Image: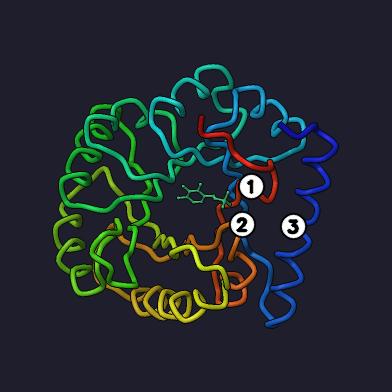
């Protein structure tokens, strides 16, 4: 694992890249950085706190729960990974945003658990913009249908879209999908659903965040560019 000084250096570089890429396309820098701490030991969260990183992303419910129990609300926790319904209960009272809402059944469970905990859970709808069958996420053609379904839930608020581009050796290949995501995001800004607001467009990871920012992302999820390589063993 990298030491604190190395992480700080990486963090500065990432923030600098974000602001440069905003400047490049003449947009204001309203980009939220979600630092992805998944797979790293708990101690990394303390490093984040020390370095004023205030939003962290985790992709597994139990791992998030265990880390949360040590640090509580010293950072804001985001759930960024695909989630099974039976895991919702672990995180519902801990996270500020779920990026990976990708089915009606999951929405129903989140609403149920949120109601029990007396919270309104902010969620992003994960979109599959490339139309590949194997990927998680809602297809463009199914968005209205799921919004119709979700609008009856009092304990869920949809606050935007999330997208995960396929890994390309050349991240330029993701540009067109990011453009499509931004158009989609803008097209839902005026809608008639009471609990659906288009505030966050979560797209861009280590490999492609510079392109995502150029194309209008206002929330990037970055792990390895800040913390170094992950060890999955
Ligand atoms: C792991 C992960 C990231 C961060 O990936 P890096 O390439 O390390 O920046 C972002 N989003 C999701 C959903 C992830 O699972």
Query: Against 67, is 175 above or below?
Result: below
User: Disc 1 vs disc 2: Cβ atoms closer than 8 Å?
Assistant: yes
Instruction: State which mark lies toward you, 3 or 1.
Output: 1
Q: Position of residue 76 (x, y in %)?
A: 55, 37
Measure how far apart labels 3 and 1 are at the Cα level: 14 Å
Please report the residue visible at 53 percent of the width from the left and 32 percent of the height from the top. 39
Where, by quadrant of the figure, is residue 216 drawn? bottom right
Residue position for label 1: 224
What label sits on residue 15 in the rendered view? 3
Where, by quadrant of the figure, is residue 209 drawn? bottom right
Query: Against 2, is 152 above or below?
Result: below
Please report the residue visible at 33 percent of the width from the left and 64 percent of the height from the top. 127
First of labels 3, 1 by sequence position: 3
First of labels 1, 2 by sequence position: 2
In-image side of 16 versus 224 (left or right): right
Label 2 CB less than 8 angstroms from ligand 1? yes
What label sits on residue 108 in the rendered view? none
What label sits on residue 206 in the rendered view? 2
Measure how far apart labels 1 and 2 are at the Cα level: 6 Å
Secondary structure under tag 3 reads: helix
């Amino acid at each position: 694992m990298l030491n604190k000084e190395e992480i700080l250096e990486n963090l500065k570089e990432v923030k600098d890249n974000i602001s440069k890429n905003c400047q490049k396309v003449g947009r204001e820098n309203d980009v939220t950085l979600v630092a992805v701490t998944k797979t790293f030991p708990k101690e990394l969260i303390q490093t984040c706190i020390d370095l004023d990183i205030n939003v962290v992303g985790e992709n597994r419910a139990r791992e998030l729960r265990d880390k949360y129990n040590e640090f509580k609300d010293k950072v804001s926790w985001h759930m960024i990974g695909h989630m099974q319904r039976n895991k919702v209960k672990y995180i519902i009272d801990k996270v500020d945003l779920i990026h990976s809402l990708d089915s009606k059944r999951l929405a129903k469970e989140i609403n149920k658990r949120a109601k029990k905990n007396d919270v309104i859970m902010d969620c992003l709808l994960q979109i599959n913009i490339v139309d590949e069958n194997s990927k998680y996420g809602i297809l463009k053609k199914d968005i209205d249908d799921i919004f119709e379904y979700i609008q009856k839930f009092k304990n869920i608020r949809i606050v935007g879209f999330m997208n995960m581009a396929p890994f390309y050796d050349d991240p330029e290949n993701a540009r067109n999908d990011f453009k499509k995501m931004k158009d989609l995001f803008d097209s839902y800004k005026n809608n008639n659903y009471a609990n659906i607001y288009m505030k966050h467009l979560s797209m861009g990871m280590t490999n492609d965040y510079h392109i995502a920012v150029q194309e209008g992302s206002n929330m990037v999820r970055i792990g390895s560019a800040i913390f170094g390589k992950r060890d999955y063993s």
